[in-house]
Amino acid sequence: MKINVSEIKRSHGLSQRLRLEDWGSVAELELTAPLVVDLKLTNVGSRILVEGNLQTRVRVACSRCAGDCDEWLDVRVDEQFLPQDSPELPRGEDLDFEQLSLFTYENDVIEIDEVIRQNLVASLPCRPLCAEACKGLCARCGANLNEKACECEAEPRLDPRWGPLAELQDRAQSGTV
């Protein structure tokens, strides 16, 4: 979505609000609830500050069982846009993190889609869970332990290369070392 900021660029402190109850789709994400976008764009001098909230539900894979689960996201947005021709725009190779996190715009038009996508993706949990009690997958046969018990042996087979060490441990426990 393109937002014309020519009106708020006229004076420091002017702002405009962007509120949508159903943004639509976002690249790379499967939304399972409407994306609510509530942003305020403010002229803060040489930059346009975009701040507000994003709320939606996203389908992700559980990190234990790989099953689908939904994660509720309530994301705080705080980004800055500089004009494409701004002298403040970092140039060269010695860029720090803050300089790399700046967005640019040209012709008084801000494209907000990438800001929304990046903020949603960054807020996804690293290890989502379908439930706290998720049992995950059997490490041997791959069975989903939430759905059925696997039929793997209870005791893992010992790699034959560890046999002499196991014998030594058995003798130490029995006291015959």
Image: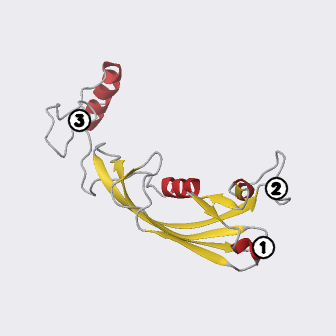
Q: Circle 3 is placed at which residue position?
A: 174
Residue 155 picture location, percent across and down: 20, 33
Q: In the image, what residue occupies the spot 86% across and 59% down?
A: 87
Residue 60 appears in view: yes
Q: Quadrant of the N terminus?
A: bottom right
Give me the C-alpha separation between circle 2 and circle 1: 15 Å
Callout 2, which amino acid? Asp
Residue 73 appears in view: no
Q: Residue furthest bottom?
A: 13
Name the secondary structure under disc 1: loop
| In this view, the mark in front (3 or 2) | 2
Is 51 displayed left or right of 29 in the figure? right
Callout 1, which amino acid? Gly
Q: Nearer the viewer, residue 19 or 82?
A: 19
Give me the C-alpha separation between circle 3 and circle 1: 79 Å
Q: In the image, what residue occupies the spot 76% across and 78% down?
A: 11
